Structures are given as C-alpha cells and as structure tokens.
Amino acid sequence: MQVKPFLLGGRWVESNETIDVIYPYTGELIAKVSRATPEHVNEAIELAKEGYKEWSSYTPYEKYKVLMKAAELLQDRAEEFAKSLVLEVGKTIREARVEVQRAIQTLIFSAEETKRIGGEVIPIDAHPNGKGKVGFYIREPVGIVSAITPFNFPLNLSMHKVAPALAAGNAVILKPSERTPITPLMMAELFLEAGLPPKALSVLPGYGDVGKAMTEHPDVRVVSFTGSRKIGEIITRQAGIKKVVLELGSNSALVLHKDGDLKKAVQKTIAGGYAIAGQVCISIQRVLVHEELFDTFLAKLEEEVSKLKVGDPMLEETDVGPMISVSEVERIQSWIDESLEKGAKLVTGGVSCGDKVSSVLTPTIVSLVPRDAKLWREEAFAPVVLVNPYSTVEECIQMVNDSVYGLQVGVFTNDLKVAWEFIRKVKAGGVLINEGPNFRVDHMPYGGVKESGIGREGPRFAIEDYTEIKMVIFDLT
C-alpha cells in the first residue's frame, strides 16, 4: 500500500513513520499516511513566516479569488470527497455529501468576508484630552494560526478554521485527527491548485506531540482547537501568551414543553440524536419532556427510532452507520449499564451489531436517567438519547443548566413568555426556539459557554480572533 505524504509548506513529504487509517465499518486498513513530528512543526512554522508575508500582501479581492476558486474545485470533486469521508469517519454517504456542501458554503462565506475586514472611526475628541485629534482602527492578520481538528467533520471543521484564517491573511498549520487525515490533505490540494502561496499552508497528521509543538511555539499567535474538554484544558495550559479558541462539545438538551409541537420534537430528536452515530458536539443527548407529554413522546420516539436503517454507510438507504471504533462502542455501553444500575430504563437499543466488527451501536433510548450518571453528566458522543420528565419551567431550566457544558439548547413551546424564560436563564451559547439544538448554519456565531469552550466560529466571527486591532491616531493641532 502506497504511503500518502503530508503537506509541509507546499512540499509533499514522506516520513519513516506512518499512521494507519481504518474504515470504522469493517475495521479494514484503507490507507497509510506519513506521520509528522515536532521537528516538522518547527520547519512548517519557519516556512509559514515566509508564506504569511506573501499571502498577507494580497489584496482582499485577490484573496477572494483564490478562496472562491478553491470552492469551485471542491464542488467539482464533491462526490470524491464524500466517499473519502465515508471511509475515514464511517458516516453515511448522505451525511458525507451534506458535509461537503457545508464546507463549500463555509469557504464561500470566508471568501466574501475578505472584502469586509475593516475598522471604525473612533471619536477621539469625545474625550477631554482628545481635542485636535482624529483616530480609527484597522484589523491586521495575527500571522500564524495553529488549527487542530477532530475526526467527526474532518472537512468542514478543518474548513471552519483554515478558510477564515486565510481570509484574514494568515498562514495556517493544520493538524487533523490522526483517525481522519486523508480528507484534510485532499482539501489542502484544492488551496494550492487555487493559487494559495505554498508556504502559507501545512497539514501535519500526527499525535499529541505534534499538537503540543503547534500549541506551545512562541511564533504561533492563535491556537484554534475543536475536540474534547480534557484536551482543551491541556491546550490552555500549554499555549502561553497567545489567543486560544476552543470548541469543546456538549451534552445538548432538547426541551418539549406541554404546549410544544410533539411531532416536530420527535422528528428533531431523531435528526439530532442519531446523525453520524451521535458523534456530533451538538448531538441531542438529553431530552426533557413535560410530564403531561412524557409517555406519549417516549412511545412515539421509540416507534420512529425502530424505523432507522442501520448498517453499511456507503448504501444510500442507511440512516445510521458505525461509531469511530469498537472501543467507543464499549465505552458507551458501559455508560448505559451504569445508568441502568442506578435505576434508568432501557427503552430500546444498546447493543452492537455489524458484519465484521462491532463498531455499530443500535440507536438507543434510555429513560429516567439519574442526574449522577455519566450518561447525564458527560458527553456521550454516541447514538444514545436519554429522555426524562419535568413538571415546571423552573425545574426544567435547572435541569438544562445542570451540566458543565453550555453549547446549544432547543426549546419547543408556543408560549412567548416561556421561550423568553429559557432565553434569559439557560447558560448556553445558543438557544433555539422550536428547533433542535443540533441546528447550525455555517456563517452564524457558533460556540459555547462554561466548559463548552471559548470564542465563536463562523467566518465573520472567527476572523475577529484571527486578526489584531491596530489603533491609528493623527494629531492635527
């Protein structure tokens, strides 16, 4: 099997050590990718300094043209990218096609933002000491951005970091998940073909030593990370004096109040709880249903879950594919067992299946889960939804907030006052009324509070982190 090289400042490099890429559905080896080292990181940063100088000298229109050309190239190769995502991640072919189209939109929005990076006039003479002075600020690129991305959306989450950082005029070093390095390397090909200065981008597949080198290096000015809370905390300790942007996941709640649309809430729970086998940071994990609707909702949800087609992710009709590995299935099964030991009820699912490996977990519903169980407190990252009842709005808000996370919450109600209570009192980065918490469009400000992270993604908002403000003052006296 030929070893795939990685991208080092425009050069495709093969190394002595390799990373095995495994198809989650069958456990088969699909590729070997060259493994980067901390020494490669240091070399990439030196090259990035030169790439930054060249790329930042491009006009906004010239940057726009390069990024738009990359979007066109991605559209031309959309099906190829989608099939690569299926093989790396195990997501279904339909889910993979959606990710590709979202990545195209992320790239287009980033291209458009190149034309809008400006500043603002500041009325210096509004201050007693400002007489005779005028001022304004401009935004400049920070220089070098380190981006570290997870396995579940290797194309679009990489694009959410790389495209806005490039739009702002920076050089970027990307470390994709060691489980899914192929699609990010394919993405890099597009940028080079579109005309990006070669030294402005490196893609370095590797392990924690590579991430550590990218995080600690003093010439890196922004570290943008999407992944686990544990690694996010490590990064904040390593980074030193530089900007850190963290998207660390959640155990998102969907609330169905007594006046809410039950049918729609069920549909959104299905869509948000089992997509990509639940391996989404805003996957619906906790469903809180008013006691008047609890039994009806649970019965309807079980009925709809039973209709999901589980299995080969390359088949068009498959709804739920495998988790990323057998070990992750075993982990979540132990969490389910723990909740049952504490008094929860298994409504359906909870067993692994599959033709060759047991990385497919049947879509699972667990009800009446105690709040000291891992299934309530931690991020499941699996096709598991728990359903618990509540009696009052105040109680429900307290239940939603009973989490170290705070990414997004969805509330189904037709009462404006109830909706506003949730908007005001829930501690989260987003509150969606009559929509699931898993909803996201790629240009909105997306991110969380508490241990769900720091900062916001979405090209316009990410660019704020990838630029520095420079204040300019003229004394006209």
Image (tube, rainbow, N blue to C red):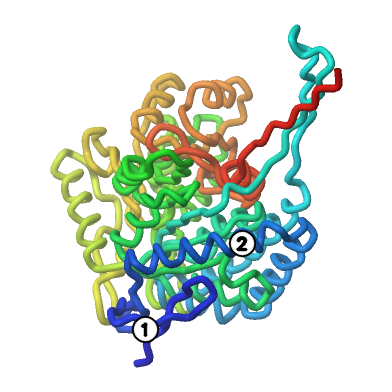
Furthest residue toward top: 128
Furthest residue toward left: 341
Which part of the image, by quadrant, shows the N terminus? bottom left
Q: In this view of the protein, can residue 34 be seen by the observer?
A: yes
Q: Which residue is mark 1?
A: 31
Between label 2 and label 1, give the one nearer the viewer: 1
Vertical order, 375 against 44 (above or below): above
Which part of the image, by quadrant, shows the C terminus? top right
Q: Which residue is mark 2?
A: 102
Between 291 and 440, the one nearer to me in the picture: 440
Vertical order, 187 against 303 (above or below): below
**On the image, which quarter does residue 4 sit in?**
bottom left
Distance from Cα at disc 2 to Cα at disc 1: 25 Å
The kind of secondary structure element at disc 2 is: helix
Residue 37 spot, x, y in % from top left: 32, 68
Label placed on residue 404: none
Between 84 and 10, the one nearer to me in the picture: 10
Residue at horizontal 30%, vertical 55%?
A: 348
What's the amino acid at mark 1?
Answer: Ala
Residue 113 spot, x, y in % from top left: 72, 51
